[in-house]
Image (spheres, grey):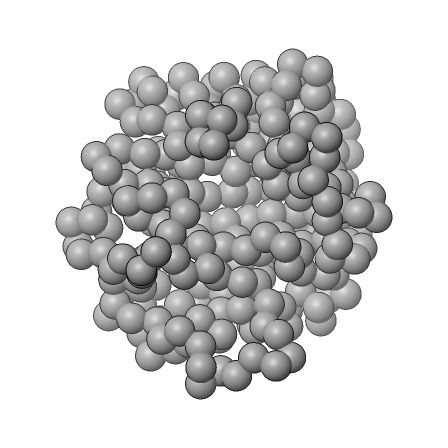
Amino acid sequence: MAIQLKNNKNIERMNSCGAIISQVHEVLSKLVEPGVSTWELDKVAEEYTLSKGFKPAFKGYQDFPGSICASINDEVVHGIPSKNRILKKGDIIGIDFGVFKDGFYADSAFTFGVGDLDNLTQKLIDVTKKSLEIGIEKAIVGNKLYDISKVIQDYVEENNFSIVRSYVGHGIGRNLHEDPQVPNFVLESEKREKSLDLVEGLVIAIEPMVNIGTPDVKVSDDNWTVVTKDGSLSAHFEHTIAITKKGPVNLTK
């Protein structure tokens, strides 16, 4: 798929989707507490979105059964909401959510703590969130995709965590997943000068997935949920970013 640049009208439509996502995350953040099921969170997200005249993007996408991806503790991404998955104190939950309307998508993820967390777990969340923020700062015209990937990887590894390599960010717009792929790391053999130029109208979902242990992951028996191979905790943050002449614009903030 060739890279599809967006005009101002396209970006405005994506921003409308992003506003709903931001509202949903705000609502869900107040519901994340011990005793709540991920099915309940999913139901709230879906009903809220539909009530605003928008459509949850994930439900039915490649037959995914939920409106949110709800990934707990060692689950990295793509966790399926369930009445049997009950949050307990000390858990962390990554909630990934996308919205569609008028031909365009937006996509965002946050990781929340359930009650008080130990210092290492809180650091994992803080570092993952910060790595996304500094990656967004590099999303400017004249930079390379390499610059986003490298600054995220460097910050995460300086803090003694690891970046998941099997899953990456992506372009987004008329499709939920478009070119280019947006890795959160660079290969040793990779040359900056050969990396993609960041240009006006490029819209990308930047989404670092960070593990306490090794970067290795595997897909669970449900064929969706991705977990860390070593059972270590994982955090995930994501925003949809439009690259403009005035700098990066966060469409899901």
Report the residue that reaches farthest toward the top.
Answer: 83
Is residue 211 toward the left or the right of residue 184 in the image?
right
Q: Residue at x 57, y 63 (%)?
A: 184
Is residue 48 toward the left or the right of residue 135 in the image?
left
| Percent position of residue 105, x then y | 33, 41
Q: Residue at x 17, y 54 (%)?
A: 8
Q: Looking at the image, can residue 115 be seen?
A: no
Q: Which residue is drawn at 77% across and 65% down?
A: 160
- Check the image and report above or below for 175 versus 36: below
Residue 79 location, quadrant = top right
- Check the image and report above or below for 196 versus 33: below
Q: Residue at x 70, y 15 (%)?
A: 84
Nearest to the observer: residue 122 or residue 100: 100
Is residue 213 toward the left or the right of residue 187 in the image?
right
Q: Looking at the image, can residue 166 be seen?
A: yes
Number of numbered discs on residues: 0
Report the residue that reaches farthest toward the front.
Answer: 1
| Percent position of residue 27, x then y | 47, 27
- Check the image and report above or below for 248 versus 53: below
Residue 113 location, quadrant = top right
Nearest to the observer: residue 114 or residue 47: 47
| Percent position of residue 65, x then y | 52, 22
| Percent position of residue 108, x then y | 46, 43
Q: Locate the N terminus and report the quarter of the image it occupies.
A: bottom left
Is residue 105 toward the left or the right of residue 87 in the image?
left
